[in-house]
Image (cartoon, rainbow, N blue to C red):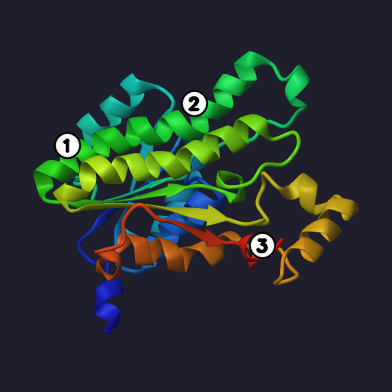
């Protein structure tokens, strides 16, 4: 095997929710493998700062302010990519939110917001990307799932429903698009230290539970996902399709 199989030179990768955290780490990782990167986020100010920092560090960067839950916003962004001559060869559906609360009291509006941001967005952005990938002879789609793609925890019902949906949406995309040389797979992160999980990391009881529950006995960091993301975005995974790969320090291996 040669490292050329992992080379993304000449490819363009769109990563949603990439102004910070997991999305930013993955985007930079794909850039390190040679890809031009399109950073996208609903937060225009944060996106501008992230893009400026990435350019300063030598990455080839484009940026798109994008509401992944809005069909018109997604369509407009891809129309602009077309005008700019940008072909999205790799899509990472990373954008997501978490709202916690007991299911008996969970507001329906918040439930829909979590589903739309974490699941419907992958359909909307994935559909626009795939329409172009079909015409261009193929591509790669990487959806970001979770441990909750397989298991549930209290107070995370809508997130669990959304990430479980990501697992099967990945398979549904594969069923329809694999024949067009599009490989669609998912990554299931374990407990990672991010802005979203900061309150959990700072909770002594929860922090202890994570370290005890995880065979690696530690939290992960966003950079831990980069290798898998590059693999699933490269020729090295040309016959890998419809899979969910957990990057979790071993949690899913034990009970």
Local packing at callout 2 (Cα closer than 10 Å; few below 14, some 14-19, many 20+) is many
The secondary structure type at the circle numbered 1 is helix
Looking at the picture, how far across and down is residue 38, in whole percent? Answer: 34, 47
Q: Which residue is mark 2?
A: 116
Callout 1–callout 3 Cβ contact below 8 Å: no
The structure residue drawn at horizontal position 17% and vertical position 40%, both measured from the top left corner, is: 132
Per the model, the C-alpha gap separating discs 1 and 3 is 42 Å
Looking at the picture, how far across and down is residue 117, in whole percent? Answer: 50, 30
Per the model, the C-alpha gap separating discs 3 and 2 is 27 Å
Quadrant location of the C terminus in the rendered image: bottom right
Q: Earlier in the sequence, mark 3 or mark 2?
A: 2
- Give the quarter of the image for residue 63: top left
**Looking at the image, can residue 85 be seen?**
no
194 w.r.t. 231: above or below? above
Extreme residue in the top direction: 108
Q: Which mark is residue 82?
A: 1
- Give the quarter of the image for residue 154: top right
Q: Which residue is mark 3?
A: 251
Local packing at callout 3 (Cα closer than 10 Å; few below 14, some 14-19, many 20+) is some
Q: Is residue 224 left or right of residue 79?
A: right
Q: Which mark is residue 101?
A: none
Per the model, the C-alpha gap separating discs 1 and 2 is 25 Å
Q: Earlier in the sequence, mark 1 or mark 3?
A: 1
- Closest to the camera, between mark 1 and mark 3, is 3
Extreme residue in the bottom direction: 1
The structure residue drawn at horizontal position 32% and vertical position 20%, both measured from the top left corner, is: 72
The secondary structure type at the circle numbered 2 is helix
59 w.r.t. 69: above or below? below
């Amino acid at each position: 095997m040669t490292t050329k199989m992992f080379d993304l030179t000449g490819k363009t990768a769109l990563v949603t929710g990439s102004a910070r955290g997991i999305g930013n780490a993955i985007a930079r990782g794909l850039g390190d493998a040679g890809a031009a990167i399109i950073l996208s986020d609903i937060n225009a100010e944060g996106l501008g700062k992230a893009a400026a920092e990435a350019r300063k560090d030598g990455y080839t960067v484009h940026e798109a302010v994008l509401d992944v839950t809005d069909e018109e916003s997604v369509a407009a962004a891809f129309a602009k990519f077309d005008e700019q001559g940008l072909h999205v060869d790799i899509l990472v559906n990373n954008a997501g939110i978490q709202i916690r609360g007991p299911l008996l009291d969970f507001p329906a509006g918040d439930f829909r917001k979590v589903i739309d941001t974490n699941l419907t967005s992958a359909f909307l952005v994935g559909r626009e990307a795939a329409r172009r990938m079909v015409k261009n002879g193929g591509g790669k789609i990487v959806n970001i799932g979770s441990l909750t793609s397989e298991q549930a925890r209290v107070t995370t019902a809508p997130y669990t429903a959304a990430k479980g949906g990501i697992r099967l949406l990945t398979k549904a995309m594969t069923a329809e698009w694999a024949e067009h040389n599009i490989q669609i797979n998912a990554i299931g992160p374990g407990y990672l230290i991010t802005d979203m999980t900061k309150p959990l990391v700072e909770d002594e009881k929860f922090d202890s539970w994570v370290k005890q529950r995880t065979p690696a006995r530690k939290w992960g960091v966003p950079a831990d996902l980069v290798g898998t993301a590059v693999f699933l975005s490269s020729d090295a995974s040309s016959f890998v399709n419809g899979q969910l790969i957990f990057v979790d320090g071993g949690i899913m291996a034990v009970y």
